[in-house]
Image (cartoon, rainbow, N blue to C red):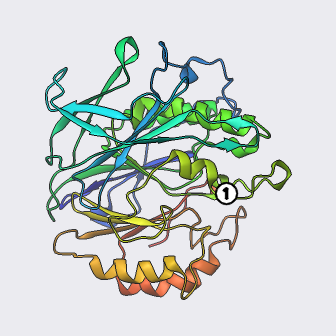
Amino acid sequence: MHVGRQISLTVTLAFCILLACVNHGDAGVTSAFIRSEYPSVDIPLDHEVFKVPQGYNAPQQVRITQGDYEGKAVLVSWVTADEPGRSVVRYGTSEKSYDRTAEGSVGNFTFYQYQSGYIHHCLLDGLEYDTKYFYKIGDGDSAREFWFHTPPAIDPDASYKFGIIGDLGQTYNSLSTLEHYMGSGAQAVLFVGDLSYADRYDYNDVGVRWDTWGRFLERSAAYQPWMWSAGNHEIEYFPHLGETVPFKNFLHRYATPYTDCKSSEPLWYAVKRASAHIIVLSSYSPYVKYTPQYRWLAEEFKRVDREKTPWLIILMHVPIYNSNNAHYMEGESMQDIFEGWFVKHKVDVIFAGHVHAYERSV
Ligand SMILES: [Fe+2]
């Protein structure tokens, strides 16, 4: 989706893709893209899209997300398999010339008997807008190099192209969607929940499939920010494995800049990027009156300045309107709580996933 005075909207969902011009107010034109008839089965573990990078303790599952409220920071995350190693990112504006260093943190966790790799999160802040940065992580022969572009300064006329992806998984269709998205020219992903579908597995395979998804995604997410929201497949309530803390894999692995917008939890937060103010909500966290999410959203709406960010976008997993048989009425309770606020604050677009079918209301 381009945001700016001239708007074209590209929505990419795991099972539907379309192109629409919202500035003319018509119903839009569907994309010429037609998905190939791949089987909708998970890609096998030994497929090259899940390949572990070569070298001792080589960084894998590299990904970035917006690291602050205003788009001047990037949060780099990666996993090392053999030992913690250093949580250091070297970076700069010239290729192979890394004149700055940032140090982050590393941690790991267990899920049933699965032992995660060493998960690193490192914030690069104080960045210039509209600038290409190169970065390097890892040591010696195992070091790896990537790059990203920072967004333009926050401005009502700043043009920016977002991709919207949800319910991605790791099937051959997921690969098709990702490759199609990567050819779109979009600059950042707004992800509307349901990441890896690792919860379709059991025992230690849950963690294994989170790792494969991280490696699968790296081809895009190491080079442009993916902004995360959580879906039902992130909950992973598995009492038969002794795993009853919701969102455990998701929260260890995927970071969000929630403290900058005064949120108390990574599951709901907001960022400003170019001409857009983006609010991320959690469909599976409490949101009724008096809850932290409810109270935070009330405050966040006050921080929206349409003079600077005329586009007000909300991400959530479960749509508040849905006429499909699948997941029918699951969004009714959030609709009941927040619909009045969305109308009052003139929210431009709400993007949701979950249903795996395209539908929109205006
Ligand atoms: Fe879902």
Residue 34 position (above or below residue 189): above
Q: Is residue 38 left or right of residue 263?
A: right
Residue at (32% x, 43% y) in the render: 186
Q: Residue furthest right?
A: 240
The C terminus - image quarter: bottom left
Residue at (14% x, 55% y) in the render: 153
User: Which quadrant holds residue 51?
Assistant: top right
Q: What's the residue type where badge 1 is placed?
A: Ile
Q: How many marks?
A: 1
Q: Is residue 209 left or right of residue 51?
A: right
Q: Ligand 1 quadrant?
A: bottom right
Relative image position of residue 311 (x, y in whole percent): 28, 67
Relative image position of residue 282 (x, y in whole percent): 54, 67
Residue 48 in sight here: yes
Relative image position of residue 336 (x, y in whole percent): 58, 85
Residue at (17% x, 60% y) in the render: 154
Q: Nearer the viewer, residue 218 or 290?
A: 290
Residue 136 position (above or below residue 313): above
Q: Which residue is mark 1?
A: 235
